[in-house]
Image (cartoon, rainbow, N blue to C red):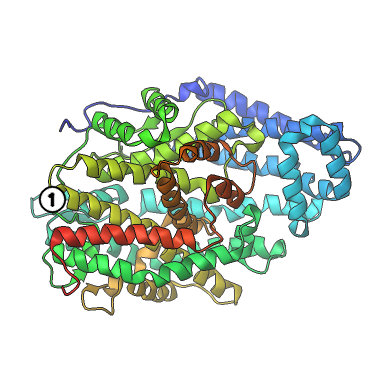
């Protein structure tokens, strides 16, 4: 591979959506003018199948236009969070979202006022209602938690308040939180933003790692109570919505829309807890590989071989990604290659640019957009694979489904992205030229499993605990959150064993985790990797139907419940088998690492 690093400047072209800010503003004004007209169907939905279909069609079409506005404003604001013009633009769109949802707040309660047999009769009478059939039947399933039209409108308006904690976190964490400098052994001084922390935490110099970790989390310690009160406000928003809709718990409220039983959540935690010895075994192998007497938290991201063996230009990243995805078929690979050529992705870090990475399929009639902060290491290539997995999921769903059913549920969101990562890891191991490179890649793969299976489940358990405390009338403070998080951090990483030590200053790590504001989102990373590993086993097994089932999965969008879509693809997450099979895969990787290191059972 070429060692050239980040030589080409690449960015997305938002002109594909609108021709510029003036065109956006005109479109926004036109959308705002349409909103009052949506209320003309009020009181008429049960008159006939035709009226119901016309109402749902119009709401759906209006929703599609709104998503285009949201896409433009979100992408522009994320290019430079410091730019108040685009932050204001994004906030204006979110205010429109409140008006839009308020104008159609009558829709669900009024539909629920129609007899179920009448709804079924309407679906049979009007073929145009077929695209809305899943929505209508799912609404009937949730009827006990839908409020009166007036109450639904109030709940819709309240979103202006309940969205605030996440917005405050984004600004504080990405822009205004004072970031410390750290001077490394090389003499280089780095300002420890989230992107720079992620870049330098992998350094093979242990003194630098410890210095970086201590400095980075010290900045959060100084604002622990601010972050705690903001997270508490987010949890209280979840609690308000759950209680208002009559759910027994915030967890039940979060899982019910996808028809996911709470037992799936609890089973995940139970299965991962039981498998912690596998993680602890890997951390002991890490300790051996790095030549340490005792493993520290700051050693968590250092490659097993010290210096990473390769750097990847953007061209290198494209090449290895596309060559890894052959099991998904020529159509998939060609479509993904076309997306990269069409510049779906904004690759490079920039001052003020939002940290992290994401993919959005909001621009339904155009194509997905991907934000990266690519720095040319193996982790960046893995992130590319992950986000392009999301993008291709959106691409296949948007192409196969109407807008009404194109948006795949969050529960499925991490499956396709993780399939891509697993296949990429497999290809990189095939290309490895030495045992050292294999050890590096296996370590990185296991770190991915650790971060997705174990770490996200730990986050989920933390999230469950803080919501349970709020439900019991307890307050959340920086001190109480630190104590709870430190306990989980130590249990999951085997602090009480002989090899791992988790210092108290890492108790504040919860404050740096944006997904804790996402209302029970994180557990789906873990269920996603369970499903992904099962799907990859099928794709590599020689089963000729596995690829077709997988492409059908990608194309299903939100046309059915997520567990049903996965079952058709061959994965049943209500049984223990996929979880235990995933953990067997992880155990196999640990055994390969131990073999390369010469670790025997007696060691």
**Residue shown at 33%/59% (left/top)?**
586
Q: Secondary structure at mark 1?
A: helix
- Residue lying at the far left in this picture: please name it: 186
Q: Is residue 69 visible?
A: no
Q: Is residue 61 left or right of residue 533?
A: right
Q: Quadrant of residue 30?
A: top right
Residue named by callout 1: 436
Name the spot of residue 236 as percent of width and height, x first.
58, 65
In this view of the protein, which residue sits in the foreground, 573 or 157?
573
Figure quadrant of the N terminus: top left
Name the spot of residue 220 as percent of width and height, x first.
34, 62
Q: Residues within 10 Å of mark 1 (few under 14, many from 20)?
A: some
**Residue shown at 12%/48% (left/top)?**
188
In this view of the protein, which residue sits in the foreground, 102 or 408?
408
> In the rendered view, would you say 358 is above or below 396?
below
Figure quadrant of the C terminus: bottom left
Q: Is residue 144 left or right of residue 307?
A: right
Name the spot of residue 402 as percent of width and height, x first.
64, 31
**Residue shown at 60%/23% (left/top)?**
26
Name the spot of residue 102 as percent of width and height, x first.
72, 45
**Residue shown at 64%/45% (left/top)?**
560
Q: Is residue 9 left or right of residue 458?
A: left
Q: Quadrant of residue 595?
A: bottom left
């Amino acid at each position: 591979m070429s060692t050239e690093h980040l030589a080409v400047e690449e960015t997305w072209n938002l002109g594909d959506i609108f021709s510029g800010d003036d065109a956006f503003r005109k479109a926004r004004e036109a959308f705002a003018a349409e909103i009052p007209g949506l209320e003309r169907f009020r009181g008429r939905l049960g008159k006939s199948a035709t009226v119901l279909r016309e109402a749902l069609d119009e709401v759906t079409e209006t929703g599609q236009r709104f998503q285009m506005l949201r896409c433009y404003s979100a992408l522009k604001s994320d290019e430079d969070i410091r730019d108040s013009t685009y932050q204001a633009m994004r906030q204006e769109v979110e205010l429109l979202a409140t008006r839009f949802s308020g104008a159609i707040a009558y829709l669900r309660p009024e539909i629920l006022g129609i007899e179920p047999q009448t709804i079924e009769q309407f679906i049979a009478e009007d073929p145009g209602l077929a695209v809305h059939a899943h929505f209508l039947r799912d609404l009937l399933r949730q009827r006990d938690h839908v409020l009166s039209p007036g109450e639904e409108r109030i709940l819709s308006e309240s979103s202006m308040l309940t969205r605030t904690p996440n917005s405050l976190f984004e600004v504080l964490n990405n822009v205004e939180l004072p970031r410390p400098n750290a001077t490394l052994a090389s003499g280089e001084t780095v300002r420890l933003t989230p992107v720079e922390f992620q870049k330098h935490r992998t350094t093979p110099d242990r003194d630098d790692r410890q210095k970086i970790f201590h400095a980075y989390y010290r900045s959060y310690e100084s604002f622990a109570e601010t972050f705690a009160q903001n997270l508490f406000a987010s949890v209280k928003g979840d609690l308000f919505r759950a209680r208002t809709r009559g759910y027994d718990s915030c967890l039940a409220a979060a899982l019910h829309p996808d028809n996911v039983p709470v037992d799936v959540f609890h089973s995940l935690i139970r299965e991962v807890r039981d498998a912690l010895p596998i993680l602890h075994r890997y951390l002991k192998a890490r300790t051996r590989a790095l030549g340490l007497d005792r493993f520290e938290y700051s050693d968590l991201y250092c490659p097993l071989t010290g210096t990473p063996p390769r750097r990847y230009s953007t061209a290198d990243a494209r090449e290895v990604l596309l060559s890894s995805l052959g099991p998904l078929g020529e159509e998939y690979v060609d479509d993904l290659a076309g997306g990269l050529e069409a510049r779906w992705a904004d690759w490079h870090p920039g001052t003020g640019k939002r940290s992290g990475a994401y993919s959005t399929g909001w621009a339904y009639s155009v194509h997905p957009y991907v934000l990266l902060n690519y720095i040319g290491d193996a982790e960046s290539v893995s992130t590319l694979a992950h986000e392009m997995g999301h993008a291709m999921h959106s691409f296949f769903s948007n192409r196969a489904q109407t807008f009404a059913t194109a948006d795949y549920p969050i529960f499925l969101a991490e499956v396709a992205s993780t399939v891509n990562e697993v296949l990429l890891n497999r290809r990189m191991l095939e290309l490895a030229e030495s045992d050292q490179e294999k050890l590096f890649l296996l370590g990185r793969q296991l770190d991915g499993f650790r971060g997705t299976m174990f770490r996200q489940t730990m986050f989920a358990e933390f999230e469950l605990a803080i919501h349970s405390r709020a439900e019991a009338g307890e307050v959340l403070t920086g001190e109480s959150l630190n104590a709870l998080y430190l306990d989980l951090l130590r249990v999951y990483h085997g602090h009480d064993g002989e090899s791992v030590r988790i210092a108290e200053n890492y108790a504040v790590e919860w404050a740096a985790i944006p997904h804790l504001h996402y209302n029970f989102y994180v557990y789906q990373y873990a269920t996603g990797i369970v499903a992904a590993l099962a799907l990859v086993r099928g794709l590599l097994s020689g089963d000729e139907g596995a690829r077709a089932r997988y492409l059908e999965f990608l194309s299903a969008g939100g046309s059915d419940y997520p567990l049903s879509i996965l079952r058709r693809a061959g994965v049943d997450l209500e049984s223990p088998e996929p979880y235990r099979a995933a953990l067997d895969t992880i155990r196999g990787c640990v055994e390969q690492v131990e073999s390369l290191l010469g670790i025997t059972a007696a060691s």
